[in-house]
Image: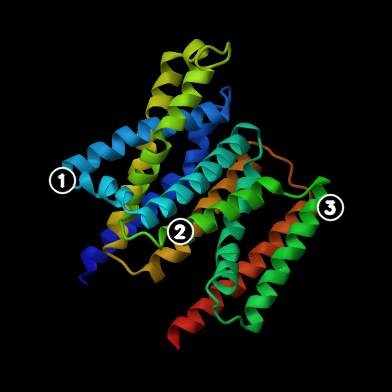
Amino acid sequence: MSRPTERSGIAYGLGAYITWGLLTIYWKFLEDFNAFELIGWRIITSAIILLAILSCNKNLRKPFTALQNKQTRIRIMLASILLTINWTTYVWAVVHDQVLETALGYFIAPIFTMMIGFIVLGEPIRTSHRFVITLATVAIAVLTYSNDQPPWRALLIASSWSLYGYLKKQVQLTSLESLSAEVLVLILPALGVVWLTYDRSDSVANTASVYEWALVLLTGLMTAIPLLMFGAASRRVPLSVLGPMQYLVPTFNFLLGWLVYSEDLDPLKLLGFAFVWVGLVIFFVDSLKSAKN
């Protein structure tokens, strides 16, 4: 692989993860609206954008063909449910001033993915893995004590994202094609949510300014752009290079929640995050050693 190709791949990868990280700011501009309604609009506009891209690439038939296979259709439907849970929990947390908890969710998601490998796929578990899981458990206990309740939004984000990733691996489609199939499955429920909320006094239709309408209608484009950049990056650089970049997203969210949106970060809560960070360092170092062997 040539150096210019690899450099462009790294640039695409950074662009994708930075965009995903900064989407928190985007959703914050829409914090006056109902999270479920926003996700309805996101699914509808994403379907339009993604299908238009597939049409331009002459791949429009792929998602529809995949949905005709019963086993694939079930996996895509389950993935679409998990995606909805993940998107809705994330947007709800952002518009309700819980950005730090979204950061926690995406920090612990790789640990949840590792646990799926052990529990579902029967992958061997090493001592380092047990230590990482123990640290994550301690972190959750500390944060539960700090907040007087479990960090359920973070747990929901992490579990839904990890299970979603597992199901995506079972579908023989590109990330663009599989996401298009998922939003196709969700389009009718999304239209139903928008229709049910349309006449509410605080709905997008009744209260959004021209500027806010533009942001709502561009959510599909904002969903597609980082996905396309990630796809371009994955074709140019190995996943071992892209993998560490995923931590940019929760890092951005952590810094935004703490420094920009002034969310409470007391010493006990910081200690909980520290346990997760130590676990991730061990996880990352162990993964590098395994790759070399």
What's the colour scheme? rainbow
Q: Nearer the viewer, mark 3 or mark 2?
A: 2
Looking at this view, name the residue that lies furthest to the front: 70
Query: Could you tell me if residue 265 is visible in this image?
Result: yes
Name the amino acid, label 3.
Tyr
Q: Residues within 10 Å of mark 3 (few under 14, many from 20)?
A: some
145 w.r.t. 92: above or below = below
Q: Is residue 169 left or right of residue 137?
A: left
Return the residue nearer the eye: 106 or 174: 174
Q: Residues within 10 Å of mark 2 (few under 14, many from 20)?
A: some
Q: Earlier in the sequence, mark 3 or mark 2?
A: 3
Q: Earlier in the sequence, mark 2 or mark 1?
A: 1
**Circle 1 residue:** 58
**Circle 2 residue:** 167
Q: Which SS class for mark 2?
A: helix
Q: Nearer the viewer, mark 2 or mark 1?
A: 2
Residue 208 in the image, given as x and y percentages of width and height: 48, 15
The quadrant the C terminus occupies is bottom left
* Cα gap from disc 3 to disc 1, whole angstroms: 53 Å
Q: Is residue 13 left or right of residue 150?
A: left
Q: Which mark is residue 145?
A: 3
Return the residue nearer the eye: 210 or 50: 50
Q: Nearer the viewer, mark 3 or mark 1?
A: 1
Name the amino acid, label 1.
Lys
Residue 184 occupies which quadrant of the picture?
Answer: top left
Q: Residues within 10 Å of mark 1 (few under 14, many from 20)?
A: few
